[in-house]
Image (cartoon, rainbow, N blue to C red):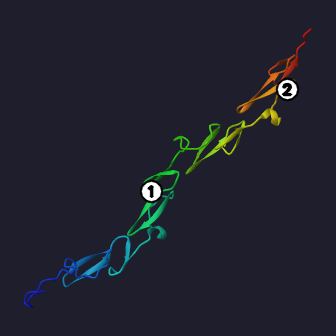
Amino acid sequence: TGDGVNCGDVDECADELDDCAENATCTNHAGGFACACNEGWVGDGVACADIDECTDGIDNCSDNAACANTDGGFTCECNAGFTGDGVTCGDVDECADELDNCAEQAACANTLGGFTCACNDGWVGDGVECADIDECTDGNDNCSDNATCANTDGGFTCECNAGFAGDGVTCADVDEC
């Protein structure tokens, strides 16, 4: 611009005379300008398309996180059972943190990204719900033939019948004479 004797550069970028894309940066230079797509975008600067870092595998999300594409970037969020910023995700110990739903009569075991529940001995179920096994009715007790079996929560007891002595597993006839 000028009178032909004295000419000054027109700053097309500052004067908004450029045709750069919304997601591009305009750089002025003597006698013109250049457009370049911003980080996270690809194209010639006049037209810019979002780069899908997740699909292209160029994100830095943890293996235990989900990547979500955003305009010009991406976000990482740890999967369920993990905690962290998405780039680094550590396993949550649901058992130690008491985040499990195991029954009172079950044992919780932490796994990578989750946990499992298993009913304790003397109990049956999926670990979330456990029912007492009646060893006496099922015939799974080791009581003597001369003893009476009594079911208890999670187990059973054996008591020798009248006229017999012992621990209930072994009962000997008492000689009353």
Element carrying mark 2: loop
The quadrant of the image that shows the C terminus is top right
**Mark 2 surroundings: few (<14), some (14-19) or many (≥20) residues within 10 A:** some
Q: In percent of the image, x 88 and y 14: which residue is there?
A: 174
Residue 109 pos. (x, y %) = 60, 43
Badge 1 amino acid: Gly
Q: Is residue 120 visible?
A: yes
Q: Which residue is mark 1?
A: 86
Name the residue that disc number 2 marks: 144
Q: How many numbered badges does the structure rendering display?
A: 2
Q: Residue furthest bottom?
A: 4
In the rendered view, does 94 fall on the left or right side of 118? Answer: left
Between label 1 and label 2, give the one nearer the viewer.
Answer: 2
Q: Depth check: 153 or 25 in front? A: 153
x then y, percent, for residue 98? 53, 41
Left or right: 95 in relation to 5: right
The residue positioned 44% from the left and 60% from the top of the image is 76
- The structure residue drawn at horizontal position 87% and vertical position 26%, both measured from the top left corner, is 145
Question: Which amino acid, mark 2?
Answer: Ser
> Quick one: label 1 or label 2, which is nearer the N terminus?
1
Residue at image coords 47%, 63%: 67
Q: Position of residue 154 (x, y in %)?
A: 71, 33
Residues 156 and 5: in front is 156
* Contact? badges 1 and 2 (CB < 8 Å): no
* Depicted 175 relative to depicted 161: above or below: above
Quick check: can you spot residue 140? no
- Left/right of residue 141 with respect to residue 47 in the rendered view: right
Judged from the image, the secondary structure of the residue bearing numbered disc 1 is loop
User: In the image as oriented, which residue stretches furthest toward the top?
Assistant: 177
Q: Position of residue 97 (x, y in %)?
A: 51, 41
**Quarter holding the N terminus?**
bottom left
Q: Quadrant of residue 148?
A: top right
